[in-house]
């Protein structure tokens, strides 16, 4: 139950309470793996071959509100007279709950959750197969060459009750004399996976190690790697259209006096029966009519449907039948030299290239920027008689436009107009999950200095100077890290998206030191007896980490109406020309609505030139220092106690999070606000003891 009362004497909502929080989460996974390998030494060759079989199982489901989510405000018990003044007179959301009457007509769904859901608890599995051959060749004592080939086969997932589907954009069908292209196809007992199996994932690998002189080694390697595949077991809602539903409570309407009463909004308001609070459309009976009829629960499929005319007029959540496997090219080259006193220095280049990386979602019905620029306001996003077109062709099969003589132009020219919920914009049409469109490039200089344990002392320091570029800033796990929530400007032209990655850390340094204090029996500070027991044998460790921050997202323009996810134009360097503080982290004057730079009006039909992520504006980097000291006390021959004292973030350095961001129009061209959060923890101390016997 969600209560949405008002601040006393005003019309300002003050929502409180609520129990719909996705807290019922069913997740059970299991992997069964079998592998075998054969090795043979043949002269200067070490040959190995083998195979692997794996079966992944996943049972998963997470309803938003298992018992439904119902909202209440004061309108059901308010005592305003007609006409409504706008200022509440009495009334209470809790009183409305007690009589079982929902929020004001048309607002019952404004709870942040669907009111009632029928959810899929999926039982999925998918196989994986692989075989490999490798030859390690030693042509000389100072040279080793390794070559190999691996074949990966990712079998498509299936579901125990065949509750899976995929979208075929090329299949044609005719319904009521109208021919259209594109349909959702459901699996069946003979073809249980929505995916075809990609049999072309061959990954060659080669590496070498050469020691031309003493203490000096040259290493290098390259390989092609595949996966993880989007064919694997996954969320229950990616491609189970029709097997789940969301029903919205539409249980109040305004009578002739302007008062809220029980009844289906828009279907004629009935005369209320005084004193009856458990009738039709009340909380006791929120969906009183038959399933599938107005006012009833939306039904779900019980078996996979046949044919090519399923889910017309609905937003599809689906996958493609055939798609490429995410592919990574890895390559590296390094020089390693051993200095006196067992100090080893390594300098190397490490790089990679990612292809066919999955996007979280793309909407196949989203219009391209070329189409948007061609038609402009004639698309009729703002409905007007002058831009309506006859309701003919595939769009006439969309129930959201049935019975209408004319439809907006945008609805008629979508690639698959028979699908979609009747609203303009991405996310309302044919939503494909895991679309393999992205790529990435990574290059880095990596150095390492390592000193092995000598004279009580060991150390390891690393430094990386790297850069990640990508056009896939919208991955399936977008909630991990910092990602642009708006999506690409045009997923068909990812040149607009190619920028520094949201995961890019330009510089990173790590230093680790461990020192056995030379105190105790036989040490530089010689102790005996009780003094040695307590003061001798202590070890001090220190770990320091320094890094730059991650890039910050560019703001959106926020022009209304919005034809696509238009970013701002970048007019200067947002990292310079101002005094940086926690309240003013970005130069807000460097962003403009596209088309306004020279005093013109905003142009909602062109792409903004700001990159998806700002390479020059980053969050505050890490400055972490951790210290620890420990000692092991022996108790007899086979027992000991180890005492540890650790401190994390000793300097108590605050690593700021990203500044909050708004659109340019919503923020009066001041999109970035003050930073209000940290992403690291404050200084901490930890004391521990471990008894071993």
Image: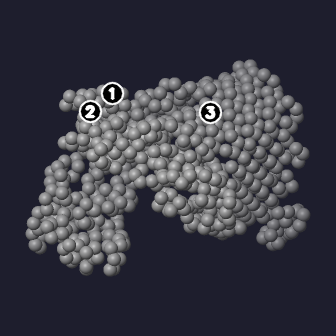
In the rendered structure, the answer to whether residue 420 lies left or right of residue 501 reads: left
Q: Nearer the viewer, mark 2 or mark 3?
A: 2
CA distance separating discs 2 and 3:
45 Å
- Residue of label 2: 393
Q: Identify the mark nearer the N-term, 2 or 1.
A: 1
Q: Residue 631 location, x and y as percent?
A: 74, 64
* Screen quadrant of the C terminus: bottom right
Helix, strand or loop under label 2:
helix
- Residue of label 1: 171
- Residue of label 3: 329
Query: Residue, x 28% and y 70% (percent of image)?
Result: 73
Query: Residue, x 76% and y 33% (percent of image)?
Result: 219
Answer whether residue 581 is visible to the viewer in this image.
yes
Dot 2 alpha-carbon crowd within 10 angstroms: few under 14, some 14 to 19, many 20 or more: some
CB under 8 Å between callouts 2 and 1? no
Q: Residue 23 location, x and y as percent?
A: 39, 59
In the rendered structure, the answer to whether residue 569 lies left or right of residue 371 reads: right
Q: Identify the mark nearer the N-term, 1 or 3.
A: 1
Quadrant in which residue 591 is drawn: bottom right
CB under 8 Å between callouts 1 and 3? no
């Amino acid at each position: 139950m969600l209560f949405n009362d008002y601040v006393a004497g005003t019309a300002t909502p003050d929502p409180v309470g609520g129990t719909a929080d996705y807290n019922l989460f069913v997740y059970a996974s299991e992997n069964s793996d079998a592998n075998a390998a054969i090795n043979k030494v043949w002269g200067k060759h070490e040959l190995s071959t083998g195979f692997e079989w794996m079966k992944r199982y996943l049972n998963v489901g997470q309803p938003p509100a298992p018992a439904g989510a119902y909202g209440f405000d004061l309108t059901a018990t308010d005592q305003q007279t007609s006409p409504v003044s706008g200022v509440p007179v009495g009334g209470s959301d809790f009183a409305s709950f007690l009589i079982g009457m929902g929020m004001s007509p048309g607002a019952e769904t404004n709870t942040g959750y669907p009111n009632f859901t029928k959810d899929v608890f999926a039982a999925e599995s998918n196989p994986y197969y692989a075989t490999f051959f490798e030859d390690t060749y030693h042509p000389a004592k100072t040279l080793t060459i390794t070559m190999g080939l691996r074949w990966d086969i990712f079998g498509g997932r299936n579901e125990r009750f065949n509750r899976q589907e995929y979208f075929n954009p090329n299949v044609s069908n005719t319904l009521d004399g109208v021919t259209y292209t594109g349909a959702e196809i459901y699996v069946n007992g003979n073809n249980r996976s929505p995916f075809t199996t990609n049999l072309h994932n061959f990954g060659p690998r080669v590496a070498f190690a050469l020691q031309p002189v003493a203490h000096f080694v040259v290493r290098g390697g390259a390989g092609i790697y595949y996966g993880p595949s989007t064919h694997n077991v996954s969320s229950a809602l990616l491609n189970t259209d029709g097997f789940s539903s969301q029903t919205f409570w539409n249980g109040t309407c305004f009578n002739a006096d302007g008062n809220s009463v029980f009844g289906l909004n828009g279907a004629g308001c009935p005369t209320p029966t005084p004193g009856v609070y458990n009738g039709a459309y009340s909380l006791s009976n929120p969906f009183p009519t038959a399933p599938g009829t107005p006012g009833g629960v939306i039904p779900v499929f019980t078996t996979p449907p046949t044919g090519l005319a399923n889910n017309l007029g609905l937003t599809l959540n689906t996958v493609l039948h055939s798609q490429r496997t995410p592919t990574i090219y890895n390559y590296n080259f390094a020089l390693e030299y051993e200095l006196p006193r067992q100090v080893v220095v390594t300098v190397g280049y490490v790089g990679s290239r990612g292809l066919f990386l999955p996007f979280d979602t793309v909407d196949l019905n989203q219009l391209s920027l070329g189409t948007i620029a061609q038609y402009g306001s004639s698309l009729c996003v703002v409905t007007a008689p002058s831009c309506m077109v006859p309701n003919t062709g595939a769009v006439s099969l969309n129930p959201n436009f049935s019975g209408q003589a004319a439809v907006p132009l945008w609805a008629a020219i979508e690639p698959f107009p028979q699908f979609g919920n009747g609203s303009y914009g991405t996310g309302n049409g044919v939503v494909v999950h895991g679309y393999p469109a992205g790529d990435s490039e990574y290059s880095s200089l990596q150095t390492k200095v390592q000193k092995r344990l000598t004279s009580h002392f060991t150390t390891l320091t690393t430094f990386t100077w790297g850069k990640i570029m990508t056009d896939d800033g919208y991955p399936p796990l977008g909630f991990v890290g910092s990602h642009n929530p708006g999506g690409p400007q045009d997923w068909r032209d990812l040149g607009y998206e190619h920028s520094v990655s949201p995961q890019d850390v330009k510089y990173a340094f790590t230093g680790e030191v461990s020192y056995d204090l030379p105190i105790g029996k036989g040490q530089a500070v010689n102790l005996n007896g009780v003094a040695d027991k307590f003061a001798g044998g202590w070890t001090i460790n220190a770990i320091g980490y320094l890094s730059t921050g991650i890039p910050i997202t560019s703001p959106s323009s926020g022009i209304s109406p919005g034809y696509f996810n238009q970013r701002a134009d970048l007019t200067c360097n947002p990292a310079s020309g101002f005094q940086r503080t926690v309240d003013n982290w970005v130069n807000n004057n460097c962003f403009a609505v596209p088309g306004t730079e020279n005093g013109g009006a905003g142009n909602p039909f062109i792409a903004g030139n700001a990159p998806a992520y700002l390479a020059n504006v980053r969050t505050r980097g890490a400055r972490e220092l951790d210290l620890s000291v420990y000692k092991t006390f022996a108790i007899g021959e086979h027992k000991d106690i180890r005492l540890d004292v650790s401190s994390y973030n000793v300097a108590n350095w605050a690593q700021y999070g990203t500044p909050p961001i708004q659109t340019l129009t919503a923020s009066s061209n001041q999109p970035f606000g003050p930073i209000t959060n940290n992403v690291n923890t404050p200084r901490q101390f930890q004391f521990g003891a471990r008894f071993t016997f």
